[in-house]
Amino acid sequence: MSDSAFQGNAHSIKIGQDVNSSTIISGDGNVGVQGDRAIITITNYYYYEDTKVVTVEYTDTADDENLPCPYRGLFHFGPDDAEFFYGREVFVEELLVSTKKCNFIPILGASGSGKSSVVLAGLVPKLQQEGHWKFTHFRPGVVRKKELRSIFDPFYAIATALVPLYTPHLDKTKQLAQASDLADLLRDGKILLSDVIAAIQQNYPNHRVLLIADQFEEIYTICHEENIRRHFLDILIDNIYSPIVQSQSPLVLVLAMRADFLGNALSYRPFADVLRNADIKLGAMNRQELSQVIEKPAEKLGVKFEAGLVERILDDVEDEPGNLPLVEFALTLLWQRRTGKQLSHAAYDAIGQVEGALANYADDKYDRLIQVEQEQTRRILIQLVRPGEGTEDTRRLATKEELGEENWFLVQQLADARLVVTSRNAAGQETVEVVHEALIQNWVKLRQWMETDRDFRAWQERLRTALRQWEETKRDEGALLRGVPLAVAEEWLRKRPVDLSVTEQQYIRRSAELRDRLLQEEEERRQRELEAARKIAEESEARRTAEEKARQEAEQRAEQQANANKQLRRGAVALGASLLVAIGAGGIAWNNQQKALQRELTARQNFYTSSLNLANQNFDKAQIIQFANLIDNLKPQSNQKDLRGFEWYYFWKLAHSDKLTIQHDQAVTSVAISPDGKTLATINSNGRTMNSKNSVKLWDMATGK
């Protein structure tokens, strides 16, 4: 098989109903007639194998070497293979009846049971014979580029299938743009799928449309966003499915899905309801049907099986629906070893029989490679297998960008060896996938590689899901890896850099850069907080030290004041005694008297001032008498200057136990007592009297008025 599959977005295959002159024509022309040959057009059908036009007259004289192989190996049967498609006649008739009464037909079957073949090589030719049908095809697992992002987009997949019928007047380039716009409009609900179907019916009023959704399990294997998957299913169900018989529905959807994904489908109730009411299960072939698969195609070309060989092949086929591709592959190899028009036991043994044919073939192709190419092949093939999670491993469609330009030449070699198939997706990217999942399940080397690399591949698929989310959010930092997932990714990047695409490596590195930047910012923030905390601690310590110093100073002052008070009390008593002695000594000379008077004045002033703190303290009786005598003796003699201050008034009242209280409504800063002790004058702080009319207020010392 060549890698030069059909190019472009929406391809069509037109094939002749008569295999003698089958043709494949690129384009979307209408169904017509060429001589006695009906032409079938399937819009958007990706036929991965190049088909050479071969004209053979089936006569006994035909060149045995030029007989086309009627078996399909690991490929499904397509419309051009209808002449050789056997064993599913009953099921095809069941499908045909369903198209008369249902507009939503899910086909469930095991991998390799022939789901695609019964639709493309069975149902489509039958409907073509009836006439007035249009056929279009899509696979939901489309990943396309949008605004430099790779996004999973089943809406684009169905849009590419419908646009050639929806806007048939547009050229291919404009249809590509139309498909992109239609996908966005369908997703956003701005255009209903039912309206698109109605427009198609107007374009082809005398036709019905068969919309084929092949390999529908890709909605689960490729799409990991539950909201996108459910939204897409809702659109299909709401706009197509009807539980009521729709014999003339303008569009019939036939979707083929692997039965091991039935649990996934049943987890969403709306889809589960559709499957409960409408699904058709494709079971394993019985012995008679398998016998037709083996004998009839060869018989049509005049080739015979050696006696007992068909029974031997049937005995070798286990009772499993997934072994049909192995039978086809073994028969394909057996055909290449035919002798004239006979298939022999010896040739069957040489290929390794049914069980070993595929593995032996793959081993042979692998062993022909040099060591470096073998390692490249291992890395390529494990990328084409998606590890199952509760299901068997499945094949995966990879792009050239993912595998790398340096590996693509080897991919083409593997395609020539029919181990992989290459094509282009709807976005025009070159793609590759394993030719059939039978290779995954039955080639021992590939299974061993997957077991060895299962942890890595399972992690890589999770990484790709995260990567798509990052690209869908226009590379927002919030979608980058963090924490443990990032640490795991860095470890895999260290161990397996060659198995990670450039985009995957970039995603991991961008995540690490964000982590490092955030750590640096966090460290800077922590340092700022530590510095602020240090300053606060220093300021707090400084305040505590200042407060402690102030407390100590206050205690010292208090202690000093207490000592001073004690000294003053002692000094007051001693002064009183000294004054009494001085007064009693009347014969002192005048000069001594003047000196004594000066000392007396100074002592008296100091005494008055220091004694303010003692004014309200109680003294024992002897002290009060001493104070009374002292104060009385301090009255000025006639012709003497009155040296008493206002303090004298308090001490005099204290000594005589006769306190006078004068009420003021403003602060008083100065007082004066008349020489006779009968009148008191008060002055406020601003020099004005407290009644604001007089500067000095006089009080009667006897009454306090």
Image (cartoon, rainbow, N blue to C red):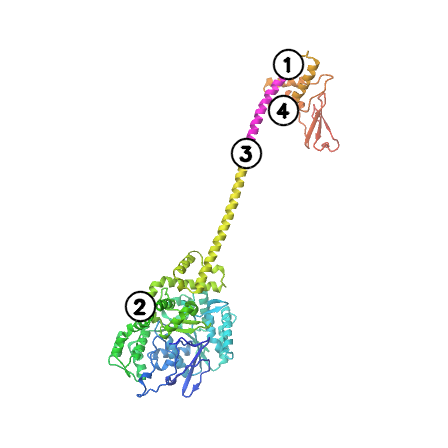
Spatial separation of the CA atoms under disc 3 and disc 2: 88 Å
Q: Say if the magenta span includes residue 487.
A: no
Q: Classify residue 649 as left or right of residue 190.
A: right
Disc 2 versus disc 1: nearer the observer: 2
Mark 2 crowdedness (10 Å alpha carbons): few <14, some 14-19, many ≥20: some
User: Which callout, 1 or 4, points at the residue further toward the start of the chain?
Assistant: 1
Q: Secondary structure at mark 2?
A: helix
Are the residues tagged 1 and 3 within 8 Å (C-beta)? Answer: no
Query: What kind of residue is marked 4?
Result: Ser
Q: Which residue is mark 1?
A: 581
Stretch in magenta: 551-577
Q: Which residue is mark 2?
A: 444
Are the residues tagged 1 and 4 within 8 Å (C-beta)? Answer: no
Q: Which residue is mark 3?
A: 549
User: Which callout, 4 or 3, points at the residue further toward the start of the chain?
Assistant: 3
> What type of secondary structure mainly makes up the magenta span?
helix
Query: What kind of residue is marked 1?
Result: Val
Query: What kind of residue is marked 3?
Result: Lys
Q: Which residue is mark 4?
A: 610
Most foreground residue, 444 or 583 = 444
User: Which callout, 2 or 4, points at the residue further toward the start of the chain?
Assistant: 2
Spatial separation of the CA atoms under disc 4 and disc 3: 28 Å
Image point (31%, 88%), residue name: 61
Are the residues tagged 3 and 2 within 8 Å (C-beta)? Answer: no
Where does the C terminus fall, quadrant-wise?
top right
Spatial separation of the CA atoms under disc 1 and disc 3: 47 Å
The percent coordinates of residue 313 (x first, y second) are 27, 76
Spatial separation of the CA atoms under disc 2 and disc 1: 133 Å
